[in-house]
Image: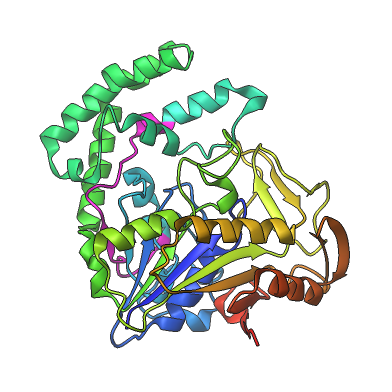
Amino acid sequence: MKKLIAVIGANYGDEGKGLMTDYFAAQNMDLLDNKVLVVRYNGGAQAGHTVQLDKSDSPESIGGDWNTGRHIFNHFGSGTFANAPTYLGPKFVVNPILFNRELKALGMKMAPKVYVSLDSPVTTPYDMLLNQWLEQSRGNDRHGSCGVGIHETIHRNPVAMLEVSTLFNLDTLRSTLAYIREFYIPNRLEELNIPQTADIMHTLRSEEFAGRFMDECKQFRNMVIPTELAVLNEYETIIFEGAQGLLLDQDFGTFPYVTHSNTGLKNIIELLKVSSCDFGTDSILNICYVTRWYLTRHGNGPFPHEIINLPHPKVIEKTNITNEWQGLFRYGLLDVNDLNARIKFDIHKYLPSYIPYKLELAVTCLDQSDGRGSFYYDGNFRDQPLTGLIETLDGTIVPDKMYLSYGPTRNDIKEKEIE
């Protein structure tokens, strides 16, 4: 029997997907026979999934700074600390520069096993710079991009394709990069009305700049295993780790304040179909939607029930802070009915009737309160004990199981069985 778990952000991202992926990986990992695979099915290096461990949970194979026992995952799956390998799927946008930087930051004694699809699009430093130049040109009207080139990579690929397969053919890689910097980027700058200043043109023409990226690509090639989707059939437990959240989905969120990606079930179902993954007679897709007990949003865009102050004085952000590209980290109150509506929409729109599933809900950051919280239900503002919010979520969404997180580590999660 194959176990399939989908970890999906239910809001604007930053819900705790890394925490839940680490939890599920640890719960299903057999250290004698590792059979858990984490699949990154969307997004790219703009994901920032935080995993924090107790020192007692740290596998001997992992080095790093255990004074904090904490890492923000971008490329690597958030099951890495549980020794689960990662598969970067065909809809995941690979960035060799940031991959190598993250590998170094992990500080692991043994490099994690990373599979990658040959069809995964690849971000160049030119895409990253173009993304940043464009955001700077927008002034106060920025879209909230992370500045790592995701949108520009996807926009470029149909006319100047660069995929992981290209990285293994040096002649094709050189010629593709030359075309991107000499023709595509200048044309794109003109299209976007971005002045081609002396500094910009100097960067585009720099052979040293291009050479450094070639070196980054070589290092990336040496650390990954190009693999077909059939690899999914080699593992007993597959965890699909989403990036961003349903409200940032390119087909669901409010344009242009969305990510160039499908954040919910759509990509997962496509992967299962293409891989011909064998469900077996007892296999079920466990779909775990993740939400904080309050809402957050990074950057510009509509935000119903936004609040000026923190949801509670105990709310502390270590990862999500105001930065140059995304701007403000904002807070709001959860609307239970809206949350239920988008979860049910994702399931009804993308999940085929022949795939059996269980609906699960994870509620995180419950320690960031004195036991009370504010939220909306049936259009009405409520301020009551968080147990009331949990029961309202249970009665409205009707999940088969709930996970309640009272801290930053996998040991702080309690399972709530639904009667």
**Residue pictured at 62% horizontal, 77% vertical:** 402
Q: Which residues are drawn in magenta?
A: 106-128
Q: Position of residue 106 (x, y in %)?
A: 41, 62
Q: Position of residue 216 (x, y in %)?
A: 27, 43
Q: Position of residue 89 (x, y in %)?
A: 32, 55
* Residue closest to the eye, 168 or 211: 168
Q: Position of residue 248 (x, y in %)?
A: 56, 46
- Tell me the quarter of the picture where residue 41 sits: bottom left
- Tell me the quarter of the picture where residue 369 sits: bottom right
> Is 220 on the left or on the right of 370, as rendered?
left
**Residue pictured at 25% horizontal, 62% vertical:** 275
Q: Please, is residue 74 above or below residue 232 in the view?
A: above
> Is 167 on the left or on the right of 105, as rendered?
left
- Tell me the quarter of the picture where residue 266 sits: bottom left
| The N terminus sits in image quarter | bottom left
Q: Is residue 118 magenta?
A: yes
> Is 375 on the left or on the right of 351, as rendered?
right
* Residue closest to the eye, 193 or 343: 343
Q: Let me know if residue 381 appears in the view.
A: yes
Q: Please, is residue 263 above or below residue 6 in the view?
A: above
* Residue closest to the eye, 274 or 315: 274
Q: Residue furthest front?
A: 353
| The C terminus sits in image quarter | bottom right
Q: Please, is residue 50 above or below residue 204 in the view?
A: below
Q: Is residue 33 magenta?
A: no
